[in-house]
Amino acid sequence: QVQLQESGPGLVKPSQTLSLTCTVSGGSISSGSYYWNWIRQPAGKGLEWIGRIYTSESTNYNPSLKSRVTISIDTSKNQFSLKLSSVTAADTAVYYCARPRGAYCSDGSCYWSDAFDLWGQGTMVTVSS
Amino acid sequence: QSVLTQPPSASGTPGQRVTISCSGSSSNIGSNTVHWYQHLPGTAPKLLIYSNNQRPSGVPDRFSGSKSGTSASLAISGLQSEDEADYYCAAWDDSLNGHWAFGGGTKLTVL
């Protein structure tokens, strides 16, 4: 079964660039027509979607983070990555990668759901000098 | 400040039915399906309801979702202590080139 695993530094200095990678195991990142997502949860706050990438490298970003975010994909390594530049303490959070549910069938018809059905365990990133 | 509005807290006693609301606008809930997530501390969020009212396999039928216009609701019947968690609604927002919007989350306490 497909699993996601985030990896990267747990500590980043202010003004530097946060870099994380999500490794997909148990299946190919190129199969299934999925958008691959990054989501975070700052301490004491709610979930915040960061952005997503398709295998064609098409991307969408959270408008509030767009100027600082780059998401890329490496299908040969079965990985996708997040870069967040000019970080501040406000970027301290648990970062998750996630994949949508995909196709499902109900009452004799089939549909596509973009709900996040598969999540990595999350990785804590602290921004501090 | 979240695009989708949820009450910050909700509570109930074991066996009760509680509902959590999620209010949005025409560009998100009014145009797209709503999903609900359950989040326990120290774990990854879990998909609870997708496409307004669908339950993934393994989710008890005590959990149900509905949507009307630009609002949605999550209902939990037969409340159990293990339901104590944070609950988030989410919907795709068609504005600004499109992006996912989450509610601010509702902390459910089982008294």
Image: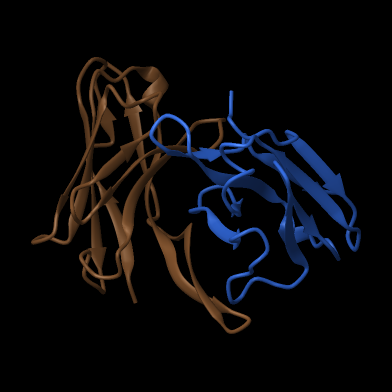
Q: Quadrant of the N terminus of chain B?
A: top right
Task: Specify the farthest residue to the bottom.
Answer: A108
- Chain identifier of the blue chain: B
Quarter-wise, where is residue A14 in the image? top left
Left or right: where A73 falls relative to B42: left
The residue that appears at 75% across and 46% down in the rendered structure is B108
Which residue is nearer to you in this view: B57 or A32?
Answer: A32
Q: Which shade is chain A?
A: brown
Left or right: where A38 falls relative to B62: left
In the rendered image, the vertical position of residue B67 relative to residue A65, given as above or below:
below
The residue that appears at 22% across and 64% down in the rendered structure is A29
Residue B26 x, y percent position in the rendering: 62, 37
Residue A102 x, y percent position in the rendering: 42, 67
Task: Specify the farthest residue to the left.
Answer: A76
In the rendered image, the vertical position of residue A89 relative to residue B11, given as above or below:
above
| Colouring used for the render | by chain
In the rendered image, the vertical position of residue A15 relative to residue B31, given as above or below:
above
The residue that appears at 88% across and 58% down in the rendered structure is B17
Left or right: where B87 falls relative to B96: right
The mark total stands at 0
Residue A48 x, y percent position in the rendering: 47, 36
Residue B104 x, y percent position in the rendering: 62, 34
Left or right: where A18 falls relative to A62: left
